[in-house]
Amino acid sequence: MTTPDPAPTTADNAVPDASGRSDSVPGDDDARAAVGRVRTEIGKAVVGQDAAITGLLIALLARGHVLVEGVPGVAKTLLVRAFSRALGLETKRVQFTPDLMPGDVSGSLIYDARSGEFEFREGPVFTHILLADEINRTPPKTQAALLEAMEERQVSTDGVTRPLPDPFLVAATQNPIEHEGTYTLPEAQLDRFLLKLIVDMPAHDAEVTVLRRHADGFSPRDLDEAGVRTVVTAADLRAAQAAVREVSATDDVLGYIVDLAQATRQSPSVQLGASPRAATALLATAKAWAWLGGSPAITPDHVQTMLLPTWRHRLRLRPDAELEGVSVEALLQSILQQTRVPL
């Protein structure tokens, strides 16, 4: 089942200024300020999930995708909807079920009786932000339909390649505690997600705020009533993504990332360590995090901050390590402590 959730305005076109001219390419500080306003808008609908909001922003800036994990009822869907609304991007939602077919996601050829020809009908993947709800409830064949779209940002059908809109981000959700009737995501698919974000239960004060908003009439189904507005233009997004690519990295910091990756491969508890793609993903997220903080270059601190959300879903532990209670999070923290940090 797919549900379109169009934003009231789109970031595809520049917004005219008071003189009627299209907005010029914003400066670095202007783009950073615009991205910062997204947090404020999302906060009108979502409370107590600052880390997840930051993760979505980093994924967008680094042109990656996000796997969002959390139990039902912690506002995963609302978070993605508010995020796309604040950015002025079109979003579509796909409820993944066991009977969902690949064509239901990417699109398929439909016979037109009037013209006597087959025409391509676009699937929900043709959007800016695709919310893949409960992605682990559909068989691997349908999960694989997302692989080309996520990696190549295109869909190929009957020998014809069709590009996806830009920007394009997949935000897939899954429930970490319910395994009946689910299909574990293969490593090839997990590796396509730039970040894995954990949406936890809100703290006490945050949950009180949630209840107060509902007591005052807030409806999570009505973002207009919540006052969530579009605060970013297409020029802002392009400028921000370009600025992130310009963040520099010294050879020492690049060597530090490689040392961390090799440490995962050499760990006796790890069956599958961080690949070179994982290392480049960590570099990309560290650059986005550095840019958000106003830094012109990444430091070991930026790498350390982004290590866990960037690599927690890319490592596979040995069965005996899992039986002994070893977790990927604890292993990565140990590697951080044991790996020499460049000065």
Image: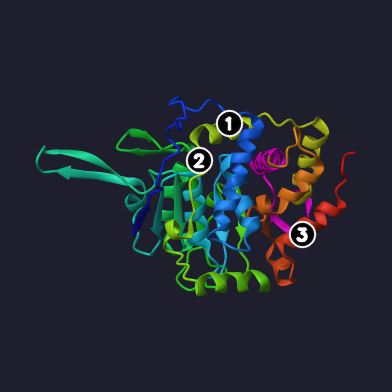
Q: Position of residue 144 (x, y in %)?
A: 44, 50
Q: Which residue is mark 3?
A: 331
Say which of 254 and 43 sits in front.
43
Q: Residues within 10 Å of mark 3 (few under 14, many from 20)?
A: some
Q: Earlier in the sequence, mark 1 or mark 3?
A: 1
Asked whether the residues under the numbered discs 1 and 3 touch, taking CB atoms below 8 Å apart as contact, a structural biologist would say no
Q: Position of residue 212 (x, y in %)?
A: 56, 73
Q: Position of residue 168 (x, y in %)?
A: 47, 41
Q: Which residue is depicted at the point 67% across and 71% down?
A: 205
User: Foreground mark, 1 or 3?
Assistant: 1
> Residue 239: which disc?
1
Name the secondary structure under disc 3: helix
Q: Which residue is depicted at the point 42% across and 40% down?
A: 10
Q: Earlier in the sequence, mark 1 or mark 2?
A: 2
Q: Which residue is mark 2?
A: 151
The dominant secondary structure in magenta is helix
Q: Earlier in the sequence, mark 3 or mark 2?
A: 2
Disc 3 marks a residue whose amino acid type is: Leu
Q: Is residue 48 above or below residue 255?
A: below
Q: Position of residue 313 (x, y in %)?
A: 63, 55
Q: Is residue 244 visible?
A: no
Disc 2 marks a residue whose amino acid type is: Glu
Residue extent of the magenta highlight: 265-291
**Residue 325 belongs to the span the image colors magenta:** no
Q: Is residue 271 visible?
A: yes
Q: Quadrant of residue 110?
A: top left
Location of the C terminus by quadrant is top right
Name the secondary structure under disc 1: helix
Disc 1 marks a residue whose amino acid type is: Ala
Q: Is residue 78 above or below residue 122?
A: below
Q: Is residue 81 above or below residue 183?
A: above
